[in-house]
Amino acid sequence: MSHQHKHAYTQRDGFTIDYGREAEHEIVKIQTKIAQYAHIENQYPTRWLAIKLLEEDSDIKMRLQVLEGGKEILTHAEKSIAHLEKIYNDDVDVIIADYRYGWINGLVKETVKRTHENRLTGSDKADKIVTHRLLGIPIFLLLMWAVFKLTADVSTPYLNWVDSVISGPITRWATEIIRVLGLSATWIESLIVDGIIAGVGGVMVFVPVMMFLYLALALLEDSGYMARAAFVMDRLMHVLGLHGKSFLPMLVGFGCTVPAIYATRTLENEKDRILTGLLVPFMSCGARLPVYVLFAAIFFPENASTVIFGLYILGILTAIVIGIILKNTLFKDKEASTFVMELPPYRLPTLRAIWFHIWERTGSFIRQAWTIIMATSIILWFLMAIPTRGNSKFNEADINDSAFASLSEKISPILTPLGFGSWEASSALISGFVAKEVVVSTMGQVYAVDDAADTTAESTTFFEDIGEIITSFLRATADTIKSIPLVIGIDLFEEEVTEEPTALMQTVHDGFEETSNGHGALAGMAFMVFVLIYTPCVTTIAAEKQEFGMKWTWVSIIGQLVLAWLMAFVVFQGGILLGLG
């Protein structure tokens, strides 16, 4: 800062804001310390510098570090900060901001004369409702319900369209290419059709679901509502010893847990970061959604959206309960932090911004399908092709005699009390450690491994397939438009649409009914709860290790596994005791 700048500043030294007796006393003490180093006193206005140090301005602290005497001044300032925080029981920068805004408010009242009655803007009027102390959380829950209603119900026609394209034309084209290459009836054909297409295709079916979810979330984010949600949830976060800023990584967690873990870096307090990081995995990431959609459609077709919404709420409630427990045990000495935020104005989302959000997030899902999920599908196919019982050859053994079945059977007894103790369900949960969407692709392989082969009997030309893809897409679009009024309970077209279960859905249904002794719906619900709670994917585990260390990562892994088993047990066994399912 030049001497000319300093002179201009000191000429207005008559203007100062009084920050209170205690703070002013510490400011003078820091000024006195600064005055001991003439080269620093000549470079910065001492009062300004003292206040900046109390606010812990990172740029100023970095500049002082390299100056002679700078470290001594910083140490002196840290003692003043600790003293003030002990007195005020709050962050010093928050106290200083309060005094400034208080001074500004008083100045405005003294000097501004209004010629007309003060009117609230449209944004202010809306905030009086959506951030209301009592109405804020119910409004948030209502909007989240609408998001999942839209996601589950409106996307169904497109979901069926993608399923028909993958199981029909794509499978036929792959089979025909394999025939031309002279590889029909070989293990290579089985790998491509029963492994890659069944595995990757089983997940790609849910791309429309993801797109509708991200469309709804993008509308809420770009309109400015999500900032209000963080403000509303601030009160609830205080119950956990956290603040509204901790809710932002949790919101990110509804998309993907990995960036949500990294988003905890925005929290200054280390204990806040660790506690938030332990709670983030309870938020249902987008990868879990295909599992919910599949099982809700199988066991609760009339109330699929409500079931999915309930699972998301269960994740939030679980995080709250676990947060309270951790706050009073492992984080007992952690002080509650303060959260100050400025609400952005409401704005109309642009089509370009919405499409960017949708494509960025859905594109990430698709890239995983062609990398992690494809690799996992290939590995699983080989495990299913290797016989461990009987005298069968490679790729000729019954799937129940495969290496994958033998491996999965080892943990089946642990899951039997939960209602899904079959090796097929166990295998899906094992592969779910790689990525949660792999749960669906694994089921597509172990439950419906021969399903795709039935489509090869159809004889159609390439152009007929293209025509069918286009016309079926148009039908799906028309059905989607018709379904929008139904989401809010209005049947404009007076049509009753019934969806026939796919071969995979029927096989999963029958398998769960058998292993649960006729309580398939309860077993299906317990399975979804287990997927919601149990240990997240390996990428998330790596992120947790990087951000919080191995000790807290093991706390997360083991804690979620045990909690998932207990909650699924309560759902299934408790449901039987109550006569449900």
Image (cartoon, rainbow, N blue to C red):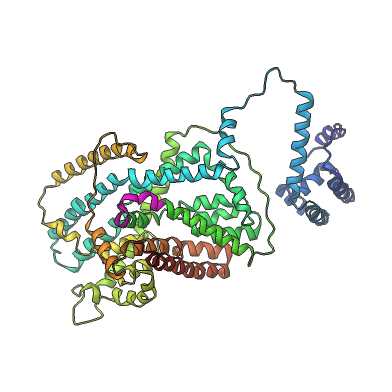
Q: Tell me where residue 566 appears, x and y as whole percent.
A: 46, 69
Q: Tell me where residue 20 appears, x and y as whole percent.
A: 84, 43
Is residue 552 among what the camera can see? yes
Query: Which residues, given as a range, are shown in magenta?
Result: 297-308
Indicate whether residue 559 is drawn in magenta. no
Q: Determine the image quadrant of residue 497.
A: top left
Q: Tell me where residue 471 appears, x and y as whole percent.
A: 20, 40
Magenta span main SS: helix
- Compared to residue 403, the image places residue 291 above or below, namely above
- Compared to residue 317, the image places residue 404 above or below, namely below
Q: Residue at x 14, y 47 (%)?
A: 462
Indicate whether residue 299 is drawn in magenta. yes
- In which quadrant of the rendered image does the C terminus lie? bottom left
Q: Tell me where residue 418 appears, x and y as whole percent.
A: 38, 69
Image-based side of 51 in relation to 221, left or right:
right
Q: Residue at x 51, y 61 (%)?
A: 543
Q: Residue at x 73, y 47 (%)?
A: 57
